[in-house]
Structures are given as C-alpha cells and as structure tokens.
C-alpha cells in the first residue's frame, strides 16, 4: 500500500484506495465527506456520504477500533476531517490524497447511502 504522512495523517493514493475497497474489510471504512449535491453528481460505489459538517454530531457512531479513510473532491476537506478525528482521539484515520479529482475508478450517480445518524454509522457494513 503506497502511503505517506502529512501533518501526522496517513495519506493514501488511488491504487491503495482501490485495493482497500476490493478487500471489503469491515474494519476499514471509507467515507465521502463532501456535500450532498457533490456526492449525487458522482461518488465511489459503496462509499457512503457523511458530510463534513455532520461529523461532530456523529462522533458516537465512530468506532476507535476501525480505520476510517475520508474522501472529498480534492483531498483538503478530508484531510481536515482526519485531523479533527485525530484530535477527538481517533488515531486510525487516513486521507485519500487527491480526492475525487484524482479518482479514475468506477463512479455512481444519485443518492447512494447518506448516513445521517450515529446509529446508521455504527451499523454501517462496508
């Protein structure tokens, strides 16, 4: 897996993300932190939407034993979410560097999965 660190946050590239998604490991969860309009216009199949602004209200749904990889348009918002999560005591977080701008894999349009409560997040199965 090709990765490096930026500001103490693991950065993964698109090949590493594709590999992670293909394994469907229940302990590695990829979340899209963009806004609903962005997500509907194109997202990675199977990756649920958890908009950046909703994450503080959903903290109780995150599991410190799992790894979370955050995705956004370019990698900036997802990096900020990773930093925020680390400040909250979640040390197993990573940023997809390059975001959807760098993604060349499959994409889906439409609603997909939009996680809105911490119960939905807690029960989400990758």
Image (cartoon, rainbow, N blue to C red):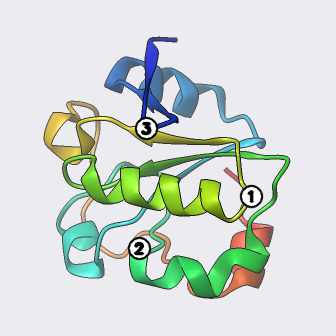
Q: Which residue is mark 1?
A: 89
Tell me which label, 1 or 3, sits earlier in the chain.
Answer: 3
Q: Is residue 89 left or right of residue 7?
A: right
Residue 47 in sight in this render: no
* Foreground pick, 87 / 118: 87
Q: Is residue 50 left or right of residue 64?
A: left
Q: Residues within 10 Å of mark 2 (few under 14, many from 20)?
A: some
Q: Is residue 112 left or right of residue 63?
A: left
Does 95 appear above or below 70? above
* Real-space CA distance between mark 1 and mark 3, rounded to the nearest whole angstrom: 16 Å
Of marks 2 and 1, the one in the foreground = 1
Q: Residues within 10 Å of mark 3 (few under 14, many from 20)?
A: few
- Residue 4 sits in which quadrant? top left
Residue occupying the point 50% across, 53% down: 82
Residue 113, horizontal then vertical, whole percent:
49, 71
Residue 86, horizontal then vertical, whole percent:
62, 54
Q: Which residue is mark 3?
A: 7
Q: Which residue is mark 2?
A: 52
Q: What's the mark number on residue 108? A: none
Q: Residues within 10 Å of mark 1 (few under 14, many from 20)?
A: few
* Real-space CA distance between mark 2 and mark 1, rounded to the nearest whole angstrom: 17 Å
Tell me which label, 3 or 2, sits earlier in the chain.
Answer: 3
């Amino acid at each position: 897996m090709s990765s490096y660190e930026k500001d103490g946050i693991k950065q993964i590239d698109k090949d590493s993300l594709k590999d992670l998604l293909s394994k469907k490991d229940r302990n590695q969860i990829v979340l899209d932190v963009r806004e609903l309009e962005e997500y509907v216009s194109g997202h990675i199949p199977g990756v649920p939407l958890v908009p950046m602004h909703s994450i503080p209200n959903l903290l109780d749904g995150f599991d410190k034993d799992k790894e979370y990889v955050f995705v956004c348009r370019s990698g900036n918002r997802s990096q900020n979410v990773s930093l925020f999560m680390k400040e909250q005591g979640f040390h197993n977080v990573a940023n997809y560097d390059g975001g959807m701008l760098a993604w060349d894999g499959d994409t889906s349009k439409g609603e997909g999965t939009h996680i809105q409560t911490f119960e939905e997040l807690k029960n989400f199965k990758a």
